Amino acid sequence: MQRQKENAPEWAGRIFKLRERLGLSQAELGARLHYSAMAVSRWERGLKEPPAQCWIQFGNIAGNPECWFFWSQAGLKSTDIARMFPEGRRSPGKAELPELEIVLAGSGKKTRKLHALPPKMKLVAIPVLGVHAATRGETGHPSAELGGVAAEGMIAAPEMWCPNPSDTSCLRVKGSSMAPSIVEGDILAVDCAQTDPGKLSSKIIVAWHRRHGLSLARFRQVDGMEMLESENRNYEPILLRKDRNWRIVGKVLWWIRQAP
């Protein structure tokens, strides 16, 4: 087993020790994270830092209490989550109400007990990625692979809004051709586990094309034809049979925007 470099940063040592504790080779750990053994080797030697999604996955694998070191590397902190709740409910006594359960999106499920809230209330912490999905007339993020994209922050949402937490991420919107429903700057929650065209007709999706990048549109199936539509009818629908380079990335579960 390869030894860790002595002058490597603390986070590199934590990854190395986690892998040793799990009894995994670099190739086996990389396979669990969908990365190569070479990538794991670089992380353990401190040559390259893992992306935010991997830090979240490391936290899920490590378990409590070590998970919070790894999650903090991705920008997730328990104090940040606590600020979402009214001041008077941050530190109630344990006997008053059951505890809140936090589920990490983007890489499976682990929980962390926080402050008391109503029974069975569970939140999903969803990474907000630093990429855009574009509407017609704009160009989105050039890659459909979101696993290596750094998270800018986190959004906590009710579990019922996120049927597949491990495959859900948030993206920002670029462009206005989906207005008035969705406008530039909105944040979308995208479930990448939902890509079956037979279940997505009339749903808003994120698709990808090598020329257009990540794109936002409404998916339609009409008389055997598949198409992508904008809310702005000045744009003609895109017939997918005429361009086979389109790929469905995921279903848009919901979106939010900041009040003006």
Image (cartoon, grey):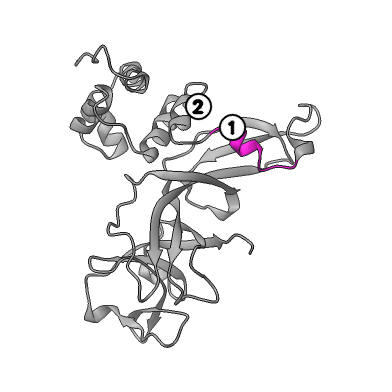
Cβ atoms under marks 2 and 1 closer than 8 Å: yes
Secondary structure of the residue carrying numbered label 2: helix
- Is 15 placed above or below 195 here? above
Secondary structure of the residue carrying numbered label 1: helix
Q: Position of residue 101 (x, y in %)?
A: 61, 36
Residue 240 shown left or right of residue 133 in the figure: left
**Residue type, numbered disc 2:** Trp
**Residue type, numbered disc 1:** Ser
Tell me where the magenta segment starts and ends, as one range. Answer: 77-86
Task: Specify the quadrant that holds the N terminus.
Answer: top left
Residue, x 51% and y 53% (percent of image)? 163
Asked whether 156 or 150 is in front, the reply is: 150
Task: Specify the quadrant that holds the C terminus.
Answer: bottom right
Asked whether 14 or 220 is in front, the reply is: 14
Res 113 quadrant in image:
top right
Sequence-earlier tag: 2 or 1: 2
- Give the residue number, with chain letter if any, for mark 2: 68
Q: Which circle marks residue 78 in the picture?
A: 1
Res 144 quadrant in image:
bottom left
Residue 111 shown left or right of residue 211 in the figure: right
Residue 78 shown left or right of residue 222 in the figure: right
Does the magenta segment cover residue 81?
Answer: yes
Q: CA distance from mark 2 to mark 1?
A: 8 Å
Res 46 quadrant in image:
top left
- Is 53 placed above or below 132 here? above
Residue furthest to the top: 6
